[in-house]
Image: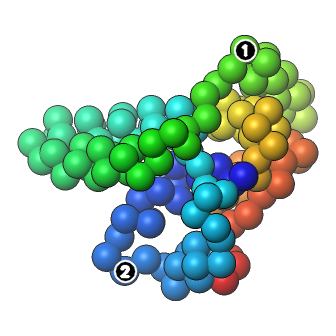
């Protein structure tokens, strides 16, 4: 199982997907690729901000299409994951590398579901015992 971070999802919806990301997706089984509820929240937030700024529902439409594609494939933050997220944030604070709440929640969801994380920002998740892949660097 591979969870897509928020920064990967918009790339997949572009008319011209980065060639490395396209190659990575081509070599990855669609059955392996999932989202999590935190990513859905972040995408929804971005869509709503764009709508309030421009009046365009384009990103709301993109989000609806994405949710339809991932129906039944959205992992939820469970109680043990929430506990793990708090521990991850404290651990990172202790070494002087704080992380945001959303990133901690995304990172915490992965082990609970046996998932790797596909993200462009691998440095944000280093040292957390996660399997990471950057589709922008493979292909």
Residue 23 showing in the rendered view: yes
- Image coordinates of residue 23 in percent, x first then y, are 59, 82
Residue 111 is labelled as: none
Crowding near pointer 1: few (<14 within 10 Å), some, many (20+)?
few
Q: Position of residue 53 (x, y in %)?
A: 17, 41
Q: Secondary structure at mark 1?
A: helix
Q: Is residue 75 above or below residue 87?
A: below
Quarter of image, res 20: bottom right
Query: Is tag 2's residue or tag 1's residue first in the polypeptide sequence?
Result: 2
Give the residue drawn at x 81%, y 43%: 114
Q: Which is more foreground, mark 2 or mark 1?
A: 1
How far is mark 2 from mark 1, CA to CA? 39 Å
Q: Residue at the spot x=58%, y=78% of the render?
A: 26
Q: Are marks 2 and 1 in contact (CB under 8 Å)?
A: no
Horizontally, residue 125 falls left or right of residue 103, namely: right
Side of 37 relative to 44 (left or right): right
Task: Please provide percent x and percent y for residue 133.
Answer: 73, 63
Q: Position of residue 57 (x, y in %)?
A: 16, 45
| Residue where numbered disc 1 is placed | 79
Tell which of 111 and 93 is nearer to you: 111
- Residue neighbourhood size for the residue with mark 2, other residues' Cα within 10 Å, grouped as few (<14), some (14–19), many (≥20): few
Q: Which residue position holds label 2? A: 16
Q: Is residue 60 above or below residue 75?
A: below
Which residue is more in the foreground, 80 or 50? Answer: 80
As helix, strand or loop, the secondary structure at mark 2 comes to: loop
Q: Residue at x 83, y 54 (%)?
A: 131
Image: 36 above or below 83: below
Q: Residue at x 72, y 57 (%)?
A: 122
């Amino acid at each position: 199982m591979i969870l897509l971070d928020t920064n990967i999802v918009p790339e997949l919806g572009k008319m011209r997907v980065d060639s490395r990301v396209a190659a990575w997706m081509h070599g990855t089984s669609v059955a392996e690729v999932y989202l999590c509820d935190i990513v859905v929240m972040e995408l929804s937030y971005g869509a709503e901000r764009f709508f309030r700024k421009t009046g365009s529902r384009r990103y709301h439409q993109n989000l609806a299409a994405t949710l339809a594609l991932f129906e039944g494939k959205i992992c939820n933050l469970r109680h043990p994951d929430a506990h793990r997220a708090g521990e991850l944030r404290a651990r990172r604070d202790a070494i002087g590398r704080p992380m945001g709440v959303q990133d901690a929640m995304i990172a915490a969801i992965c082990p609970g579901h046996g998932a790797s994380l596909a993200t462009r920002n691998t440095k944000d998740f280093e040292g957390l015992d996660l399997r990471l892949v950057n589709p922008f660097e493979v292909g």
